[in-house]
Image (spheres, rainbow, N blue to C red):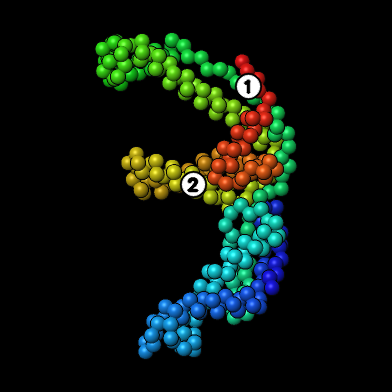
Amino acid sequence: MTRSEVKKIDSTKRQVDIEVEGERVKSKFEEVFAKIAKEAKVPGFRPGHAPRDILEKHYSSAVHEQVLKELIPDIYNEVIAKECLDVVELPEITEVKLDRLKLTFTATVDISPEMKVEDYKGIKVKYEAPIVGADDIKRYLDSMKESRKLDVIDDGFAKSIGYPSLADLEKSLERQIFVQKENQERQKMESQIIEKITKDMDFKLPASLLARQLQEMLKQAKLDLALKGVPRAKIDEQENPMLAEFEPEAKKQVKTYLVMSAIAKKENIPVDDNMPRRVIEFLLKNADWKTA
């Protein structure tokens, strides 16, 4: 029998007290003992033939640990599903007690904040078709000229990098610049949509989710500094200032993720690693497009 009680700590944190007793705990002990008995090496006995009392003496601690390792995740997941808790981070497991007939433990979890996501269909987005002008191409050619220390960009140079003529090189650059501008325009539209769906929403962010995002940003920043040759001690000195600097952006990213998750659940979009991209595609598909 499994019993659970959910206690509200604050708007995004819950304490879940869980108790399991009876046959499930007993049978798990027997199952683990049976596995160990097949492989146990006890002096004076062939593997799989040591008496139970000898196994208890030598392996009770290992069995205890293995029972916890196998039972806690299964029971935790069952209880979270039963209690319909929208958990956003790994739990903190405490107060673990186990004997041969009963297991009790407490899981402290962060959950998604309650929010109403509305009016996310028909968002007005403005699309401006990219235009590639002669100045854009000239800037690229000037950059190539400068980086390669050339006096002139001509047909000879174009041939040296795989183009029949300077005109062909310019056409290729035009296509590349167009794609870059098109990508920038799409990113601008995505930013418009994200800004509109999150702007007026106010809710408490789960602390563990925010902490994880900050640590990810800090880890990347430290790696970037290390690759630039900054000494380890110098990088460590900057940790707290960097965390303070990253916090506003981390909050924005976590808030965006949670709002997108809420939309995904309403629209039956799978909440997996591809969820943000799928939600953006859904929002763009259902947007009110204005072209310029």
Q: Is residue 206 left or right of residue 118?
A: left
Identify the residue at horizontal 47%, vertical 19% (top origin).
178
* Dot 2 amino acid type: Glu
Which is more foreground, mark 1 or mark 2? Answer: 1
Camera sees residue 20: yes
Residue 55 to residue 286: above or below: below
Give the mark nearer the N terminus: 1 vs 2.
Answer: 1
* Dot 1 amino acid type: Lys
Identify the residue at horizontal 44%, vertical 43% (top origin).
220
Q: Residues within 10 Å of mark 1 (few under 14, many from 20)?
A: some
Q: Is residue 135 left or right of residue 82?
A: left
Residue 81, quarter of picture: bottom right
Residue 148 to residue 35: above or below: above
SS for callout 1: strand
- Given residues 38 and 129, the one toward you in this image is 38
- Given residues 5 and 280, the one toward you in this image is 280
Q: Residues within 10 Å of mark 2 (few under 14, many from 20)?
A: few
Q: Where is residue 136 shown, x and y percent of the image?
A: 44, 14
SS for callout 2: helix
Residue ID for mark 2: 216
Identify the residue at horizontal 58%, vertical 50% (top origin).
209
Identify the residue at horizontal 52%, vertical 41% (top origin).
246
Residue ID for mark 1: 126
Q: CA distance from mark 1 to mark 2?
A: 33 Å
Q: Quadrant of the C terminus?
A: top right
Q: Quadrant of the N terminus?
A: bottom right
Camera sees residue 199: no
